[in-house]
Amino acid sequence: MTPAETLPGVPVPELRALTLVGSNLYWIDSQGTPTASIKSVPTTGGKVTTVLSDPTLDQNMTTDGTLLYFTWTSAADAGQSYKPSELDSVKVDGTSRTSLVTGFSTQNATHTTPASELFLAGGNFYFVAANNTVITNQLTSAPLAGTSSPTLINASAGSAVDLAYADSTGVYVTLESAATPGAFDFSYVPLGGGTVTTLYPGGPLSGYPGAGQVTVVGSTVYFPIDGVGTSAVTFMSATVPPTGAATMLGSTITGAVANGIIGDAQDVYVFSDGTGVYSLNTTTGVPTSVDPNAVNENVSGEIRALDSKNVYFGEAGGGLWAHPR
């Protein structure tokens, strides 16, 4: 197999929310520091361009193929029980920054670290946030046109711990039970709310898929479950839209923790902190190592993108990598 290579000319001190638009990669760089910014580079490598600089940037970013959408959080709490956040858009050249969504917070008493949890599906944004009346994290939606009053989705189902994915039918999220605090279910919620389908029930929080650890290919959703205490990854699948518990696929990766998964009709790739990059056979569930040399790259779920030539991933502090498909 041809190993992954770093993209030339791309020193990346701190990489989050890798996003592909056309033939350019965009990411949030050095989040949480005075030099935080959105940066870009061609998929072939080369000169890194600063699109926007803002020390208040969160780790959240998505795109509709034309604009970049991201959140930022005030350094002050403004006398509230949370630090107010905002969802903005900007053109890929860094111009025309526009405020779209207010009235929420990605940082509060129980969500002190800004999460990489922003998706655009069905004409709405989906993210995990709190507001001035509900200080626990909730699955939240807001229209693409913007609003000052984001909508809480299925708040009665319990607080949302991690939003992993959203597609044209619904969102995939880990929920803490409202009836049994400390119990967690990985679940599917239709866009706009409705009946919650439990895909993987009652496991420990640390084993559930987080942002970037779910992918939908055709009519099937795939996600990993980490075997807490066993250092093994098991893969699960379900039809879309899900109507019941997910099915376990046929194999595991031992000595590893799943950090991300991404796929299309051609391939599904799995990123493992500990054993490299794998291609997952979606029929048998058997993962095949395609780049064991990536073992030390410590790729994170939100740090991956895919085009017809390469799968792209990155390491916080280690640059951007491209693996030929």
Image (cartoon, rainbow, N blue to C red):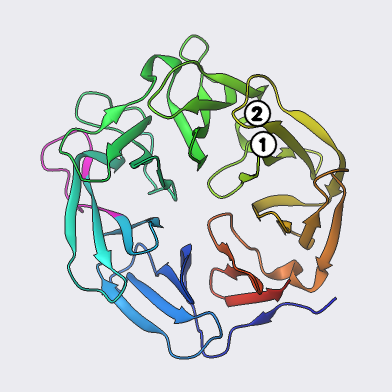
Residue at x 35%, y 62% (from the top left corner): 32
The answer to whether residue 143 is above or below residue 241 is below
The residue carrying mark 2 is 204
Quadrant for the N terminus in the image:
bottom right
The label shown at residue 207 is 1
Residue at x 35%, y 27% (from the top left corner): 136
- Left or right of 137 on screen, residue 265: right
Tell me, yes or no, if residue 183 can be seen here.
no
Residue 113: x and y in percent read 39, 47
Residue at x 67%, y 36% (from the top left corner): 207
Residue 198: x and y in percent read 61, 21
What is the distance, in whole Å, between disc 2 and disc 1 at their CAs?
Answer: 6 Å
Image quadrant of residue 199? top right
Disc 1 is placed on an element classified as helix
- Left or right of 183 on screen, residue 268: right
Magenta stretch in the rendered image: 71-84
The answer to whether residue 297 is above or below residue 163 is below
**Residue 82 magenta-highlighted:** yes
CB contact under 8 Å: marks 2 and 1 = yes
**Residue 123 magenta-highlighted:** no
Q: Main secondary structure of the magenta part?
A: loop
